[in-house]
Image (spheres, rainbow, N blue to C red):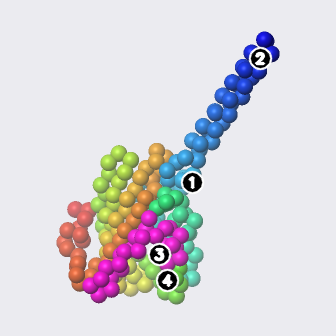
Amino acid sequence: MKSVAKRTLKNKFIAALVCTFATSAYAETSYFCGADNPKQAAQIETLIPTLYDIVSGRPEEAKDWHLLKQLFSPKAMITPVFHNGKDVIAQPGSVEQFIALNKRLFKDKGFFEREVSQKVFKFGHMANVLSVYESRRSPELAPYARGVNSFQLLNDGRRWCVLSVTWDSESEQHPFTEQILHLSD
């Protein structure tokens, strides 16, 4: 009888240890934004400028694609909007697809994107950032395009990450208004 009680007690102890370790391991890897915790994701005020810095540069300059991946949630969506005459084409994709597109489009030419103004709408653990940008081939040149990035962000209790981003460039069909140019006012 004592041996049965000892075995039962031993089994309960082992089960409790397994549950403790499993819960601890789950807690360490279950953050929505991913296991990494880059310092640039601590605040929205550092996250957004870092995104612009990563995608900007001369063709021969290496870009920190690893950090870019860390700033997005593992299942993030990136949706550029392209214009073909009157047709509008939205192409949702993953961070990996965005990186491949960026490498293809800018392998032989510079790309520098700069934020002009932004508006942050924050509630609880979520935020939406509308960010007006200008695109240049070189920092010294005039912008060849401008548009608006719409970032949807989440804070998983440790840091911010991008859930999705969609952008659209200014066109004849939808030119910038004063309201867009002065989002931060």
> What's the residue type where badge 2 is placed?
Val
Q: Mark 2 vs mark 1: which is more N-terminal?
A: 2
Foreground label between 2 and 4:
2
Give the residue number, with chain letter if any, for mark 3. Answer: 56
Residues at marks 3 and 1, CA–CA distance in whole angstroms:
23 Å
Q: Residue 36 carries which label?
A: 1
Callout 1 crowding tier (Cα within 10 Å): few <14, some 14–19, many ≥20: some
Q: In which quarter of the image is residue 78?
A: bottom left
Give the residue number, with chain letter if any, for mark 2. Answer: 4
Residues at marks 4 and 3, CA–CA distance in whole angstroms:
10 Å
Q: Mark 2 vs mark 3: which is more N-terminal?
A: 2
Horizontal side of 95 relative to 84 (left or right) equals: right
> What's the residue type where badge 3 is placed?
Ser
SS at mark 1 in the image? loop
Q: Mark 4 vs mark 3: which is more N-terminal?
A: 3
Residues at marks 2 and 1, CA–CA distance in whole angstroms:
46 Å
Q: Are discs 4 and 1 less than 8 Å apart at CB?
A: no
Q: Does the rendering let one see residue 142?
A: no
Please check the rendered image and state whether residue 82 is part of the magenta-colored stretch, yes or no. Answer: yes
Q: Give the range drawn in magenta.
A: 77-101
Q: Residue 106 carries which label?
A: 4
Location of residue 4 in the rendering, given as x and y in whole percent from the top left corner: 77, 17
Residues at marks 2 and 4, CA–CA distance in whole angstroms:
71 Å
Q: Residue at 49% across / 78% down in the picture?
A: 101
> What's the residue type where badge 4 is placed?
Phe
Location of residue 34 in the rendering, given as x and y in whole percent from the top left corner: 54, 53
Q: Which mark is residue 27?
A: none
- Which quarter of the figure is the C terminus placed in? bottom left
Q: Does the rendering let one see residue 10?
A: yes
SS at mark 4 in the image? loop
Horizontal side of 182 relative to 14 (left or right) equals: left
Residues at marks 2 and 3, CA–CA distance in whole angstroms:
68 Å
